Amino acid sequence: MNRGTLAVVSLVLLSALLVLGGLWYRRTLSRPIIDWWGIEAVELLRTAPTAELLVFEHVPRGASDAGAEERVIGGERYVVRRRVDVSHYPGLTHLRHALLERVSYRFDVPVRRPLDVRYGLRLESAGRAAEFLFDRGQHVVADRRGARAVVLGPVHKRMMNYFAEAVAAKGTAAEKGAPLSESSVHEAVR
């Protein structure tokens, strides 16, 4: 075998090893997230074509809100006040990636109950759905029922700002798919 062939074969083998090492490393980083949310929710975070932002309002005990879509989250009653399609909003891809990254979570910090849920992100694909609920006070993201909750790091504030801007843009050009303001695009979840 001549030197040129040996060099090419060596580079191909080295490339294959680096790709396998990268895949192993990426899998190792995302393992805690897969274990926490479950494989179906993680797949929806990565690939769901439909994303809807839900705006929640807490309903005090004994009060009723006839006709509103009600949810029980962590033992507390909430109603869905607004639904905003954010499937094509700029920054959504960054938000999804942030929810898939281990560094976004603080598994070592305890979650206080009850939660104070303000927003929900509903992802849908082919009849499957996952919801992620965002607490406004203690930087928590939780599952649909509020049973599984974990504290988010500094990325939580950016997510809440992104959600607030998406809700404020409802009915404007942004609702029809035009970009949100530059500040949201650049400061949205990284």
Image (cartoon, helix red, strand yellow):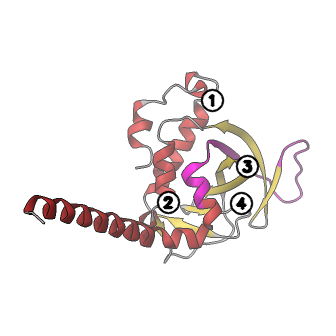
Residue 132 spot, x, y in % from top left: 64, 56
The dot on residue 144 is 4
View extreme (left): residue: 3
Which contiguous range is marked in magenta? Answer: 42-69
Q: Is residue 190 visible?
A: yes
First reached walking from the N terminus: tag 2 or tag 1: 2
Residue 157 spot, x, y in % from top left: 47, 52
At 61% from the left and 42% from the top, the residue drawn is: 49
Mark 4–mark 1 Cα distance, whole angstroms, equals 24 Å
Q: Secondary structure at mark 3?
A: strand
The reply to whether callout 4 and callout 3 are in contact (CB within 8 Å) is no
The reply to whether callout 2 and callout 4 are in contact (CB within 8 Å) is no
At 88% from the left and 53% from the top, the residue drawn is: 63
Front residue of this view, candidates 126 and 33: 126
Disc 1 residue type (three-letter): Lys
At 41% from the left and 65% from the top, the residue drawn is: 103
The residue singled out by tag 2 in the image is 100
The residue singled out by tag 1 in the image is 170
Q: Secondary structure at mark 4?
A: loop
Mark in the foreground, 2 or 1? 2
The residue singled out by tag 3 in the image is 57
